Amino acid sequence: MAGLAVNVDHIATLRQARGADYPDPVAAAVLAELGGADGIVVHLRGDRRHIQDRDLYLLKKTVLSKLILEMAATDEMLSIAGDVRPDLVTLVPEKREEVTTEGGLDVVTHADTVANAIEILHREAIAVSLFIDADAKQIHQARALSADMVEIHTGRFCDAEAPAEKTTAFADTVEAAKTASELDLGVNAGHGICYNTIKAFKGVAEIDEFSIGHSIVARAAMVGMEKAVREMRELIKELGIG
């Protein structure tokens, strides 16, 4: 069965909106694990718009499953990752003007930068995933750069409004997952997945883990974090994904 990694960034977004010390993403992570999360995801951005350094260091001490750090391949973040030593680093693109990550990392264009980051992280015995679009060139490059896994950007599928566009985007996503699996890369998927869009993945065997944040946090505002995670976990199980 596919795993579920829960992103708690939006808990921090709510906290930062008022400059308060609550709600605490560290506490949210504890509840997510109680609900069955297989991992906790945070994105430490250069502008610190939501997750703060304090959160990351406390999560390293408290997360019992696995800690996944999303970050840009910058010297600052590589240094922090080496200090914190998360279980997995996912390298992502990052633009200050975006609300959330808008697309996959172009590992073909930025091969040298990505290769350097992977080498540094591997020296620290940190596994590396690359957040990329559902594109065969990107997947083959990820393999060539010695990434351990890829996270396929599912936003194009999840955000599509026209049925034909949605169908094409989903087919591309599944094909990308199959290609990555055939290359012996771990396969994660994330961005925009909610309690409805995840149903499309029923029976897809190649996805090892889903990374889901916004929809779970939104649901948690109504029913609580533990229950929201448990509902998603049960849904994955019922759908027979992975």
Image: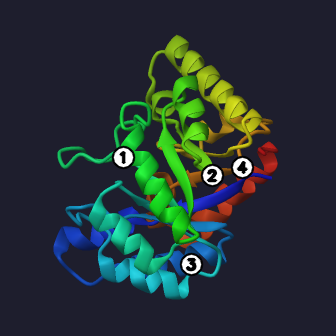
Q: Nearer the viewer, residue 161 or 213?
A: 213
Mark 3 or mark 4, earlier in chain: 3
Label 1 to label 2, Cα distance in Å? 16 Å
Q: For label 2, count other residues whose C-alpha is less than 10 Å away and answer few (under 14), some (14-19) or many (20+).
A: some
Q: Label 1 sits on what residue type?
A: Thr
Mark 1 or mark 2, earlier in chain: 1
Q: For label 3, count other residues whose C-alpha is less than 10 Å away and answer few (under 14), some (14-19) or many (20+).
A: some
Disc number for residue 218:
none
Query: Helix or strand or loop: what does disc 2 sit on?
Result: loop
**Which of labels 2 and 4 is toward the front?**
2
Q: Label 3 sits on what residue type?
A: Leu
Contact (Cβ within 8 Å) of mark 3 with mark 2: no
Q: Label 2 sits on what residue type?
A: Asp
Q: Which residue is mark 3?
A: 31
Q: Nearer the viewer, residue 93 or 78?
A: 78
Q: Which residue is mark 2?
A: 148
Q: Which residue is mark 1?
A: 113
Disc number for residue 208:
4
Label 1 to label 4, Cα distance in Å? 26 Å
Q: Label 4 sits on what residue type?
A: Asp
Q: Is residue 205 visible?
A: yes
Q: Residue at x 47, y 15 (%)?
A: 162
Instruction: Tell me: 226 left or right of 73.
Output: right
| Residue 74 in picture, x, y percent from top left | 30, 57
